[in-house]
Image: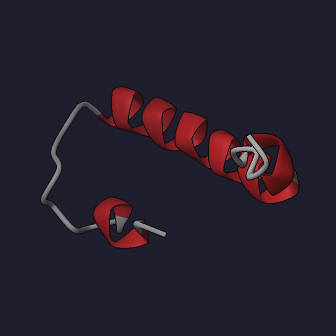
Amino acid sequence: MVSGLWAPGSGRLRASSVAGDAARGAAALVVQDVLDDPVAYAEPSGG
C-alpha cells in the first residue's frame, strides 16, 4: 500500500523510533485484519 512512506532509511519521517514502530505495527495489524476479512469492513451495497 503506502510502503514507500515507511521505507527504512527514507529519512522523510523522523518521528521517535518507538512511536513510529508502534504506529507501523498498529497500521500493519489493521491492514492485515482488513485483508483477512474484507467483507467485514466493506459497506453493505444493498443498503
From the top left corner, tell me how far across and down residue 17 is, in percent.
Answer: 33, 36
Left or right placement of residue 41 versus residue 37 in this view: left
Q: Is residue 39 above or below residue 7?
A: above
Horizontal and vertical percent position of residue 15: 20, 36
* Residue shown at 84% from the left, 52% from the top: 39
Left or right position of 32 against 16: right
Q: Above or below — where is 4 with respect to 26?
A: below
Q: Camera-side residue: 3 or 22? A: 3
* Rendered location of residue 38, percent (x, y): 79, 55
Q: How are the colours assigned in the image?
A: secondary structure
* Residue 5: percent from left, percent from top: 30, 63
Determine the image quadrant of residue 6.
bottom left
User: Residue drawn 39% across and 28% down?
Assistant: 18
Q: Where is the C terminus found, in terms of image quarters?
A: top right
Task: From the viewer's side, name the closer residue of 19 and 46.
Answer: 46
Left or right, 9 with reference to 31: left
x 69%, y 44%: residue: 43
Taking the spot 26% from the left edge, 67% from the top edge, the residue there is: 9
Position of residue 27 in the picture relative to residue 36 (left or right): left
